[in-house]
Image (cartoon, grey):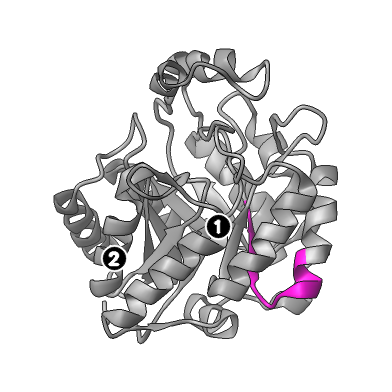
Amino acid sequence: MAKQNKTIITCAVTGSIHTPTMSDHLPVTQDEIARQSIEAAEAGASILHIHTRDPEDGRPSVDPDHYTPILGRVKQSTDAVINITTGGAPTMLIADRIKAAERFAPEMCSLNMGSLNFAFHPLAGRYDSFKHDWEKAYIEGSEANIFRNTFADIRQAAETLGPLGIKFEHECYDVGHLYNLKFCMDAGMFKAPVFLQFVFGILGGIGADIDNLIFMKRTADRLFGDDYRWSVLGAGNAQMPLATTASQMGGNVRVGMEDSLFIRRGELATSNAQQVAKIKRIVEDLGSQVATPDEAREILDLKGGDRVNF
């Protein structure tokens, strides 16, 4: 696949199912999520990947009403592409996880391409106290999580959201998920060009190694040829190194406090915008250009911000 001329920066703004609220800088309320989304767009993110939380207790939420205060405000303040999660949490069924995307018909939404043991229970032992009384048990309980994304779940998302003109960010946590996507494309569920998000460093998925990035990329080349675009998500300390490598391989990048609370080893990020500004500087210093929102729309063949329901 030919190298594209511009690098798309996605910012995953909101701490989701695997991010403990152990940083005062992590946006949790609707006001904080909206504000940090706008700041991330101003810093250079052309796509904003958004989760939301219950304003009462900070739990991860997929309630469309919890998105409403965020989406309109972000759209009024930026031209960024909005990407709504369908990930939710491992305890949620796909019927609930797709409700927000179905109501709001964003330009993009995420879609996990296979089931996995999605675990983050080791985090429970790293902290002495938690901001929410539900959080420690929730994190410890992830040892028993199976993040369900069956072929039936994937079909349900495709058949519900595809007719709305939504482009999927196909999140692939391991090489088998690429083969799942190829099967689904052959079955007519998704149209080329598809957008792949290679996810590295989640316990239960493929490790955050450069060799694995090269392997995933070669496998995608073999399976999809010129019919895909791709990006890299590195969890935790792998965020910036893998993003930097991906940008030099012709790929796109994702940063944000959903994936890492840190700006560098041992130092908490003060905002999502700080992470976006850092990877933008790196990409440009290494000789590449960062895509604007409209350039991202052209690269990914998106429907446009005038065709969303918010």
Q: For this view, does 180 lie left or right of residue 147?
A: left
Write the residue at 22% across / 54% down.
213
Q: For this view, does 172 lie left or right of residue 58?
A: left
- The residues bearing labels 2 and 1 have C-alpha atoms spaced at a distance of 17 Å
Q: For this view, does 226 lie left or right of residue 259?
A: left
Write the residue at 54% across / 31% down.
20
What type is the residue that disc 2 sits on?
A: Thr
**Start-end of magenta stretch:** 74-84
Write the residue at 27% across / 70% down.
225
Q: Position of residue 126 (x, y in %)?
A: 41, 21
Which residue position is annotated with label 2?
244
Mark found first going from the N terminus, 2 or 1: 2
Q: Is residue 182 above or below residue 133?
A: below
Q: Is residue 176 magenta?
A: no
| Residue extending furthest toward the left | 211
Q: Position of residue 113 (x, y in %)?
A: 44, 44
Q: Is residue 251 above or below residue 29?
A: below
Which residue position is annotated with label 1?
272
SS at badge 1: helix
What type is the residue that disc 1 sits on?
A: Asn
Is residue 309 among the parts visible in the rendering? no
SS at badge 2: helix
Residue 180 position by quadrant: top left
